[in-house]
Amino acid sequence: MTNGIDDREPGTEAELQLQADEEILLDELGIFGESRRKFLGKVAAAGLGALVLEIVAEQKALAFDAAEPSLSPLTVENPVTVSFSVNGMKKSIELDSRMTLLDALRERLALTGSKKGCDHGQCGACTVMIDGRRVLACLTLTAQCEGREITTIEGLSHGADLHPMQTAFIKHDGFQCGFCTPGQICSAVALMQEAKNGELSYVTADVRQKTATIKLSDDEIRERMSGNLCRCGAYPNIVAAIREVHTGKATDPMAELPLEVENASV
Ligand code: FES
Ligand code: FES
């Protein structure tokens, strides 16, 4: 390969001969011996040799060491420097102006609590708070966050002291696989403040009645949490957890289970 142009005949022995830079690349990727022969055989058979190696090389160039989350990737296109606070810590990072907040949190700051579910603003798994209001991090550009205060799930607890909403989710079994849970909890925490501010929802009974604080019914909780999906269907438990934090009245999760099932069959 010279100046990025591969002049080897496709499918020939020559094509399977690696150049020095390709050898190094495959060594770094840990593709040795039999695996290397199979890898090369497959890409040659598909006529993709040079292309695959170029793509792999590009991915390596963009990669960074997750153990050093403050490191910049080797290549940043359209760079902008954004300064903000994340969970009370000041951060200033140079990143691609098109990078979403979710990717910046996960890939650049190693805060992987916020999850990437759909990456299209439809599941709520990426919910974080900006200046106390819930947002979908997958639909927020990091460049929009200059000077803002970002709170992720990692910022809700203080060491072993969990946020009351986290404690309530555990007590009421508000999760199964846990994938949606960071987003659910961030959303629920912001929801408490929205209720205190008297903000209305689609199911608020009387929108003309001005109240300082809204008392959340179960319907209100369900409606206001409807942007956070749970594939495991832990919804009743999530509502119970939020209700307990909202009312401040501890409830017994076992007492909410139906004790008897009429006409039950197994
Ligand atoms: S990942 Fe953001 S809404 Fe689904
Ligand atoms: S707990 Fe599994 S998706 Fe909600």
Image (cartoon, rainbow, N blue to C red):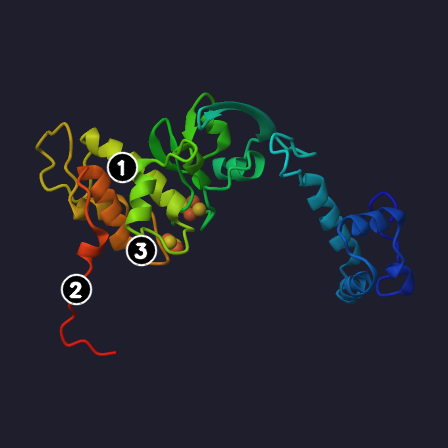
CB at mark 2 closer than 8 A to ligand 2?
no
The amino acid beneath tag 1 is Leu
> Alpha carbon of mark 1 to alpha carbon of mark 3: how far?
18 Å
The amino acid beneath tag 2 is: Leu
Where in the figure is residue 160, as x and y percent of width and height?
41, 36
The answer, for residue 93, to whether it is visible in the render is: yes
Kindly identify the residue that appears in the image at 51 percent across and 37 percent down.
Answer: 111
- Can you give x and y, in whole percent of width and height, for residue 43 in the image? 76, 62
Q: Nearer the viewer, residue 221 or 244?
A: 244
Pair 2/3: label in front: 2
| Residue placed most toward the observer, 161 or 58 | 161
Q: Earlier in the sequence, mark 2 or mark 3?
A: 3
Query: In the figure, 197 relative to 162: above or below?
Result: above
Name the secondary structure under disc 2. Answer: loop
Q: Badge 1 is on which residue?
A: 191
Mark 1 vs 3, N-terminal side: 1
Callouts 1 and 3 close, C-beta under 8 Å: no
Compute the Cα span from label 2 to label 1.
Answer: 31 Å
Disc 3 on helix, strand or loop?
loop
Residue identified by numbered label 2: 259
> Of callouts 2 and 1, which one flags the residue occurring earlier in the amino acid sequence?
1
Count how many numbered circles sit on residues in the image: 3
Find out whether the residues at labels 2 and 1 contact each other: C-beta distance under 8 Å.
no
Graded by Cα atoms within 10 Å as few (under 14), some (14 to 19) or many (20 or more), the crowding at tag 1 reads many
Q: Quadrant of residue 264?
A: bottom left
Give the answer, above or below, for where 112 lies relative to 18. above
Q: Secondary structure at mark 1?
A: helix
Is the shortest distance between ligand 2 and the CB of mark 3 under 8 Å?
yes
Nearest the viewer among 209 and 262 is 262
